[in-house]
Image (spheres, coloured by chain):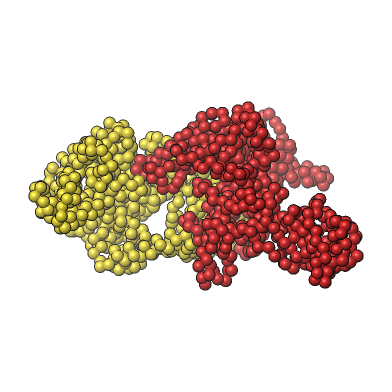
Amino acid sequence: MITLIKSLKLILLFTFTASLNFSAEAIESYKKWDAEIVEIFKAMPVQEEGRLKPVQTVARYKLMRINNSKRLSFEVKGEKIKVSATEWLLDCLFRPEVAKQLPIFKVNNPDVLEAIGVEPHKSPRERYSYKEISSVDGAMGKLEERSKELEAIINDPDKEEEGKKARRDPVNAGLLSLRSNLAEFFYTLNAFNFARNGIAVDLGEASEDFKKAEGGRSRVSYFLSEFDKVIDLARNSDQRDFIDLISNGLNDLNNVMRVAGVKDNISSIGLAMFPPMSNNDEEWIKPGYLIDQLSFRKNELSVQDQKKFAQWALPKVQILERLTRNVESPSFATDLRALSDEIVSKAKERGEYKNIELELLNNRLGLFHWALPFYIMAFILLALTWLGQGTKVSKFLTYGVIAMTVFATIALIAGICFRSVLLGRPPISTLYETIPFITGTAVILCLIIEFFDRKGIALACSTMIGIIGLFLAFRFEIKEARDTLKVLEAVLRSNFWLATHVIAINIGYAAAILGGVIAHLYIFSSFFNIGSKDFRKSVTRMVYGVTCFGLLFALVGTVLGGVWANDSWGRFWGWDPKENGALMICIGALILLHARMGGYIKELGINVIAVLILMITVFSWWHVNQLETGLHSYGFTSGIMFWLFIVYAIESAVITMGISCSIFRVPERKARLAAYRLSLSDLFPLAFFLLAFIFTIVFVNLAKISTG
Amino acid sequence: MNETVTEAGRATRKKKSFLSKLYDFFSGYLLAVILLTFLLALTYFGTMAQVKMGLYEASEKYFESFFLVDKIGSVPVLLPGVYLVSALLFLNLTLGAIVRARKSWRRPGMLIAHSGILYILLAGFVAFHYTKEGNMLLYEPGVKIINKTDRSIMIPLPGGDKALQPESLEPEGFDVRLKALQHLPLKELVKSGNVKSIPLGDHQSDEIYSLLNWSIEVTKYNSDDEREFIHVIGPDQLSGSWKEGEARSFKHDDIPFLLKVSGYVKNIMNSKGQLPGLLSQKQIESDEYKKKNIRVVVGEGETKGYGINSVPTNKTMERNLPAAYFDIFTEIGIEYNSEFESNIAGKAILIEFGERIEKNRALYVFGENGFMRSHKDGKLVGESVGYSVDGLEVKFSAREEENVQAADKLEMRMLFASEDPKLGDEITIKDRNTSFAGKILKIDQEPNYSALLIGSSPPIPPRPFTFSVGGEKWSVDLTRHRYTLPFAIELENFQKEDHPGTMRAREYSSDVIKINTGRKVHISMNKPMRDAGYTLYQASWGPEGAGPNDRLYTSLAVSHNPADQWPKYGTYVIAIGMTIHFVQKLFSYLKRNNRSRRRKEDSQ
């Protein structure tokens, strides 16, 4: 079973994350990190984006931003090597020369590379290494220059249209993305430079007072410990050379310090890996800050505090120096463990480590990743049952399908609960979190429906929704490449409203989507003339029931959203796009119910409108976030437009099919096959024409949008 | 669906009267479906329009209107606005779901749910028409107290006078704010101790300013340089589109000058906060702007030598900064000419300015500074000053009357109100029997003061343009429209907390005191303060990018909405109603399902 899951996962990864990549210029050798080192390192806590998390999480998303995948694989002399994100980060920090050769940069568009003079690989799937790009003469310079030009246009308030156009251009977007990835890599690579290389000043040469100096360079820890003396000497010296030397040294120190990350609250440079000295402080410390406080900002503290701080901070600089300078020695693991033990025990003392352990467990379990293969297997089994309907084997298989679906759903729910516990808040607060939640809700609804109406219809929908939902979640995670466990803005930090409004509205979304999905069955059945009248009646009943259920939650959720808004900024309703989207779902459902009550629509009408509601839900869930306007701006994402239009096109086609059914009702035949042929042959040309028409319109619009 | 069949059946059996047919339509499902479909389409159009127009304008066009014209493709289509659709829906709901619906104790769900929706629609109506909202800005308490002369307000002591109750909030244009004060025997009250005038620090405030509306404040100062009263030219008088070169003039009995506002532009600021719409003389004379003929202010004040040019409005309405030219005329002269007939008699004449002015007949009024001169054959034959004014009737002395009759040309000087006289405008003078008409030949008065004013928006302190008329100090300012609250608030403490190592706010909150009662409240995100019908919310803080040593201010959103909590109750009602209904439906479905299954099993 495990092998099956693994191989399935592999297929998935291959198809959807395109993570199997090979570099054209393979590196010559790669020595794997010791497993013990990796274990220690990945569990070390780091503060990032306002949250304390294990290094593993940081490494995964860092790599994902650059490489589009949580892991790395490449070939060395014909042998395939897989490297985890943690190992890759170890390489970056401690073996930068190796890291530079690893093929990690994904560039989809060969024009991007040509624009900076790098020769593109034959396969677009192949990654590029830092060395490969930086070794081309002038490539980095050209990239920098082009990016600066682009940014100037994009940020110019007077050239809004031009800026939009520039951003939409695929080559420009590729250039900017490559530049930002290279920058991120560069900063990660050089974060510990200060410890590894020291600074370019030999104090021993400068003055007899400094005996410990090493040929040409000084250790930062030594320079810092002697900082006052150095400055004093420089101040009172009349030797021009000495003063120059020291000022160059200070410049150098400033540079390595910046790359190691200082306390600026904005940039994501450096790793905030040391717990603060005072237990009252929440902000963890980046190595660059230690340098800053020991040198340039020294005078901000009293003499006594300076001493205290130096006692606390210098050993930290020294241990990093030991680590970076003895990577190959056996002491590396011991030193790393000592550092980790110190940090972890401090974190435990501060009561911050519990969640790290939980998050590591969550990372290891990868519950969402477990759920997906089970949904897929359930779907395959279900397809098998269709082959031999009514037989004992098929009945037996159906139990298997149910078991797998239930198992997958439990994994999904457990994953959602894990996240909820980790962040100490209700399950949904970001766009990403809506995906597993809506998927889970829709699947559970299906299982409930299946319990009452045991025809296998809802079961089929459940597996489909499970697969599509989880794929979406994975794709979205890769696209965003940001830690999905996020801290929240002040206005969202209300567990009451997150637990009521947000959950209600997402249950509403889930039901609306489910209703639409089930309605597809009716339309297909009607269009291709498959399935009995009874089947269609069942489907319609489900659609109706789910829509009623969805309306209850969508309506209450929408109004509760207004009540929340009224409590947070004094406005019940502000016609914000996200609010409007939710309102449109409610109106859609109300139209369905009232038109049905008034007798204006029958079975087919109910199903067609349900598909329309599905489209509205997709609009509300994803599209409005693309409009780049409004208050609910927590989920701006780009590049989703293309897929949205695909969905609209398909759903429009389905609606067209539905409508065409009502216009050209084919009398049902007893001999299904004959009728099948007849209905197809009758409807095909017309349906084809209509579909072609809709697709043309959609794609013309799409083309218009993509070309601006 | 059975209901429909029977309904339809009944309809064919009986012939219905027109009225009952109308009633059927207005209470029927058809109208409900049509209205809901319109609502769906309008919501969609309005949402998409926000991308180009911004929230405010799109809301105005789609959601607050009765009708609108929208282009579908390139064909203009007349659509009902959401306001109209909602009103009809309200009617449809009341008639269909409440009056007409079958009321059965066994099936109460839908009745309850629909009542809830009606309640929410009603709340929307009340909120739309009666909400007043604005922002209040309070600095952290500190040593810095704003200049006493700059701002001081009247605080009613507990149990004191009620003069400052919410009436002073009426957002009607001219002459609103402090009108209540103006009609109070102010000084007496101070003496009797009912009202205490205290200087306010910038950590205290009793006023809120609108984020969307702008007004002009005309202030008179007393001899101690304190504000005696303020006249407000409200948003109503500044709203609408200003055509190029349009000027609007304002005059009031209490104000001894005419204020002419011209070249009003809604925005001169770009999204970065720069002012590309404020042009120096050099820029104006450059080739880029030469053709536009932009006026350069020659008068006094900080903006001397500058001109304004409209910049595209920001989609976020709050971020727009208006500007306009202000001209102050303490005296206006008009030379008036007519083909004179000598048979005019009567003691009074009525001044009209042709059809265009018909509606505003009261606008032209002779005042203290006005006079009339009669000419014949180029010679001055009579002059009259200080005649009394009674509405539109201007009385002449007997001697002047003769002169008027004999004259072939009249020259008048007068103060006038909000219509701007232009060369060539026709003027008709009437007496009881006859009338005569002529054209304005000359407007010979230059403004006494001119200034260019840029909207002042908190936290930037206002910089009004000051001048003197008749030895008294006056000022005009273009500001965000301000309302006075019936109470004043003091900020005791403001806390801001970021997520560690980020600039992302985790929490911000303000501890405030209601000054006249001493009530202390902690206002934080999602936890507003409610008092005397007003709700104060933690909205934001500033200044942007403040360092650790900067003095911060808190920005509280204030709203006064009579329907504040209605939607909350409405939701509960809807939730209860729908739950009852759908649960009942589910159970009856399950019962039926079981029955049919049993039947199937039995038959097998």
Q: Is residue A146 left or right of residue B10?
A: left
Q: Answer yes or no: is residue B65 visible.
A: no
List x then y, in percent, for residue B58.
59, 53
In the rendered picture, chain B carries what hue? red
Quadrant position of residue A426: top left
List x then y, in percent, for residue B311.
54, 61
Residue at 50% over, 33% down: B512
User: Can you say which quadrant of the picture contains the N terminus of chain B?
Assistant: top right
Q: Between residues A236 and A82, which one lies in front from this camera angle?
A: A236
Residue at 88% over, 57% down: B398
Q: Answer yes or no: is residue A103 visible.
A: yes
In the rendered picture, chain A carries what hue? yellow
List x then y, in percent, for residue B425.
75, 65
List x then y, in percent, for residue A572.
58, 41
Q: Is residue B538 left or right of residue A488?
A: right
Residue A459 vs B292, above or below: the answer is: above
Quadrant position of residue B134: top right
Residue at 48% over, 45% down: A461
User: Can you say which quadrant of the picture contains the C terminus of chain B?
Assistant: top right
Q: Between residues B259 and A676, which one lies in front from this camera angle?
A: B259
Residue at 33% over, 59% down: A179
